[in-house]
Image: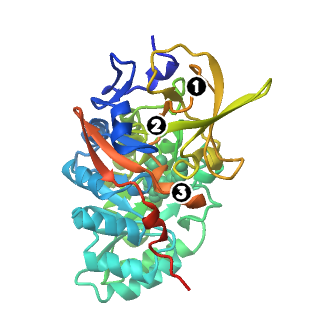
Amino acid sequence: MASTNCEKLLTATDRINEFGHLEIGGCDVVRLVEQYGTPLIVYDETLIRDNCRRYTKSLAKDGHRVAYAGKAFLCVALCQILAEEGMFLDVVSGGELYTALTAKFPVERIYFHGNNKSADEIAMGIKAGVAHFVVDNLYEYSLLKTLAREAPRPLSILLRVALGVDAATHRYIRTGQHDSKFGFAITGKDLDFVVAGALSDQALLLEGFHSHIGSQITNLGVFRQAVEIIFEIARHYRDKHGWQPTEINLGGGLGVKYLPDDEASSIEDLTGLILETAAKQMAAGGLSPRLTIEPGRSIIAPAGTTLYTVGSIKNIPEVRTYVAVDGGMTDNPRTALYQAKYACMLANRATEPNEGVYSIAGKSCESGDMLIWDHPLPAVKSEDILAVFVTGAYNYSMASNYNRLPRPAVVLVKDGTASIMIERETYADLVRLDRKR
Ligand code: LLP
């Protein structure tokens, strides 16, 4: 019997092998640690591909599209996998765009997001031939208008709108409400101005509207609301200008199970609800835009597991036992930022019974550098390998070099074979940009 109820988080290609070790994608994680060291982020290729296929199979028909949200995690090898899976890609900065271009990700499948794109970033996107710009605000609109004149063909744009839908999720990852830094308010004059301006501009091709209401959403009802409101907006401007919107983009946001007993809806629950709600709207309103969605977390979070080596252990009698690992908030700031909760397992002794309750601390000089509070585990010893599950989204992509800690290596596993996706940072990397006086 395995030691924790983490078996519920094991994916179809995870198992506990005859040595009592966790295996991901056919790779014994103890061997992975010997080869690549820790902290190590392990991505399960089969699961990434399966999740992409579940989205495309259930939504991408009749011209509808699934764009992976690169902010959740992006690197060259992942872009290559996404391209093979026929996915579109949402990038949010020149850096994400550069990563996609390096991977030769098809530019005609790229959406360029961001609430403060610089003129340089926009120019970079135009030069690369990015297919769609998701325009967030008046300033970006004015930059784009000027830069579009130099473009070889009209630039396809979507206008991001803040729908006023309040997704019940952490305050920092809610985005669709009126009081948000993202998108055009649907109540002010700015949106009227930009729609009218874009429709009369030969260098711009206004395709439709975009919204993203938030992330880690477990109550799907808010998506129904979002679809209804965005279609209402589309109808309003259709009627006003006699123009047919050709695209409605609903952003991402599907929540995942971080803990074994968390509730989460499935990919098909979300796509089914979107298609059903949109079909009603289309039938009633005489609109037939393509639908695009932009999932990040629900594709990549469950496919990632972080492996750490246990170092110091501090017991405070009657209070708590702290187990320090060789990473922490630098590779996973989500506990510190959002009070996120994670489940873990001793990956080298996965069949041993739980004997205590431990709190997993990082190695940064900061009391808030905690990964997990009060988690049952077998009697933990220094040098044990700790696996933290569901760390594939917004961990590496939000990693930092606080305390000049190098960022971890990232490997991809499949059918018993591992390959490096991102090398471990070295100390030399850390001083590469430093200049002596
Ligand atoms: N589209 C847009 C425009 C977005 O802003 C986002 C996420 C997504 C798609 C993807 O959403 P997802 O399917 O991954 O929920 N750092 C936070 C999450 C921030 C989400 C930002 N936007 C976290 O660690 O929870």
Residues 233 and 50: in front is: 50
Is label 3 in contact with label 1 (beta carbons under 8 Å)?
no
> What residue is rendered at 46% in x and 52% in y?
396
Res 415 seen here? yes
User: Which of the pair 141/308 is nearer the observer?
Assistant: 308
Among all residues in the image, which is located at the extreme left? 84
Q: Is residue 402 above or below residue 310?
A: below
Q: What's the amino acid at mark 3? A: Leu
Residue 353's spot in the image, x, y percent?
53, 13
Placement of 88 over or under 42, stated as above or below:
below
Mark 2 residue element: loop
* Percent of width and height locating residue 174: 59, 51
The residue closer to the viewer here, 339 or 388, is 388
Name the residue beneath numbered marker 3.
405
Q: Mark 2 — residue?
A: 390
In the image, taking residue 378 as reference, residue 385 lies left or right, namely left
